[in-house]
Amino acid sequence: MNKEDFPILNQKINGRQLIYLDNSATTQKPKQVIEAMNRYYEQYNANVHRGIHQLSLRATVAYEHAHEIVAQFIGAKFEEVIFTTGTTEGLNLLAYSLGKDLQPGDEIVLSEMEHHSNIVPWQRLAREKNLKLRYIPLTAEYRLDLNAAAEIITRKTKIVSVTQMSNVLGTINPVEELAGLAHARGALLLVDAAQAVPHLPINVKGLDCDFLVFSGHKLCGPTGIGVLYGKKELLEKMEPFLSGGDMIKEVTFEHSTWNDLPWKFEAGTPNIAGAIGLAAAVEYLQTIGMENIAQQGRELTRYALEKLSTVPNIQLLGPATAEDRGPIFSFIVEEMHPHDVGELLDSEGIAVRGGHHCAMPLHHKLGLVGSTRASFYFYNTREDIDALVEALQKLWKEEMEITIDRNEISSTALSEEQELYKENILDHYKNPRHKGELAIYSVKHREFNPLCGDDVMMYLHFNNGTISNASFTGQGCVLSQATASLLTEHIQSMPAKKVKSLTREEVLSLLGIPVSPTRIRCVLLPLKTVQRGIEQHETGN
Ligand code: PMP
């Protein structure tokens, strides 16, 4: 639907037509949004609320109009829509401002499928104020266990904060029901709607949530702009988060009073171009119709579920049926690291994401370090799903195995010498040297790449300042594992001082092939682990 509005989609990646399936991370921008932002910069760029000249007046009108458009889009009042930098800032604002009224022993209820941005601010608040965090568990069908929720949400609960659509599982949570449960116990209901607002018609009054946050960039808008909705009577009572210009009514040397809503929560020069872009995105979505977008999402979901279930050796996460589920599909390819799956799909022109998707606790709960995620938006088609399924099926054709493994390492054209290096990397991956715990070691040190879940533990044994033995354990992508193997071989009998000064270039030269910027971290993880291990040994920490 409307693919022609997205100039970026009309390009080839690795010689193939780009198929963009990373929409849960960020969506593409239609030319209507790009043009609206360009118009602002080309014709009326000025600061808002402060000038009386024509450009500033035009910018102010456009900025305030953007609030109106967004308010109407989610069924809120003008004063109830605050522009933030995104979902993350919205949740931090809420943790800060609502946290002021909480007392030791109060409880905050989250769910096991939350994004880090709906966990970490609450953890910090809980530590600071001695609060208790409780989590609504998942059922075997990857839905929230509402019976457990009814027990976990008690009179001690002050805040319930849940995602409306999981960015990993695609599960759509029953927000109205949770609002009922929370309100019956005197708690507030906060909704992380980062994934829901792009896909579903949202009416905050219908949901009866107290607060709802989302990001503009996930619904065809620009990055750096997001929305916090709050019930007016609650926002009025709350302390502002940031302070400075624009959020005040009156300032003396002694004290200040706060501006009216929504400006009370918008300190400093706002993201004017972002707001204009967001408004253009909302208007663009409204011309398509949110019901139509939701309908297209449901159709793609049904089709993807049907097709992906035919791929051997993949395990789909998330509800198996299309009911109450969005077009976000995370999966595990047996015996393959998500990073490697992502790179292989990229070589076919298919953009997906591999890692924990900012939901580490959820992945740990499922016994996983990460997953591969294909997430769709209305400009995706059934053909995109067919291409994904075909590429995944190809991964598992036995005769392809060697080619695939070799492509995991590097899919670019290589010289004859580099091809030999590539064989060597593959050999180190398949037959790692020095893998396993050392019986006797001086120090062990673990490093972890939070982006993709690569995990390396190094065991080092020293003798007179020399590494007399080194080994590693852990799991990760082909590059991180092969480098750990190559490196442990390389540093045997090397003075620790020399190992400490090994550079990234030296490690890359062990591999002997070009490594893409996104994979450099995979290669450098074993080096960092060894060097920090030596430091740890030296300092005794
Ligand atoms: N919550 C959910 C459910 C998300 O998917 C995301 C983005 N991945 C966020 C919060 C954070 O959004 P942002 O990075 O735009 O602040």
Image (cartoon, helix red, strand yellow):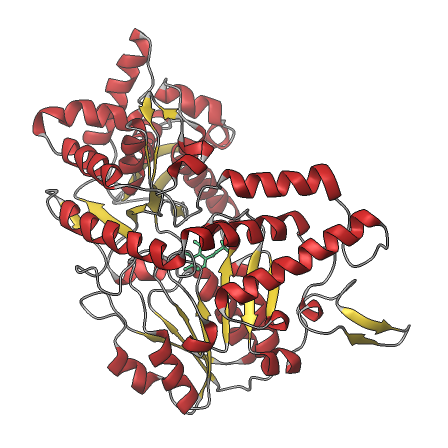
Taking the spot 30% from the left edge, 27% from the top edge, the residue there is 347
**What percent of the width, then of the height, locates residue 362?**
32, 61
Q: Quadrant of residue 470?
A: top left
Q: Nearer the viewer, residue 175 or 539?
A: 175
Figure quadrant of the N terminus: top left
77 w.r.t. 388: above or below = below
Q: Quadrant of residue 476?
A: top left
**What percent of the width, then of the height, locates residue 337?**
26, 41
**What percent of the width, then of the height, locates residue 246?**
77, 64
Compared across the picture, whether 199 is left or right of 214 comes to left
540 w.r.t. 232: above or below = above
Q: Residue furthest front?
A: 287
Q: Is residue 1 visible?
A: yes
Compared across the picture, whether 21 is left or right of 253 comes to left
Taking the spot 48% from the left edge, 27% from the top edge, the residue there is 504
Assign ligand 1 to one image quadrant: bottom left
Q: Residue furthest top?
A: 416
321 w.r.t. 413: above or below = below
**What percent of the width, then of the height, locates residue 301?**
24, 53
Taking the spot 65% from the left edge, 83% from the top edge, the residue there is 237
Compared across the picture, whether 432 is left or right of 204 comes to left
Total number of numbered discs in the rendering: 0
Q: Is residue 454 visible?
A: no
Q: Nearer the viewer, residue 80 or 163?
A: 80
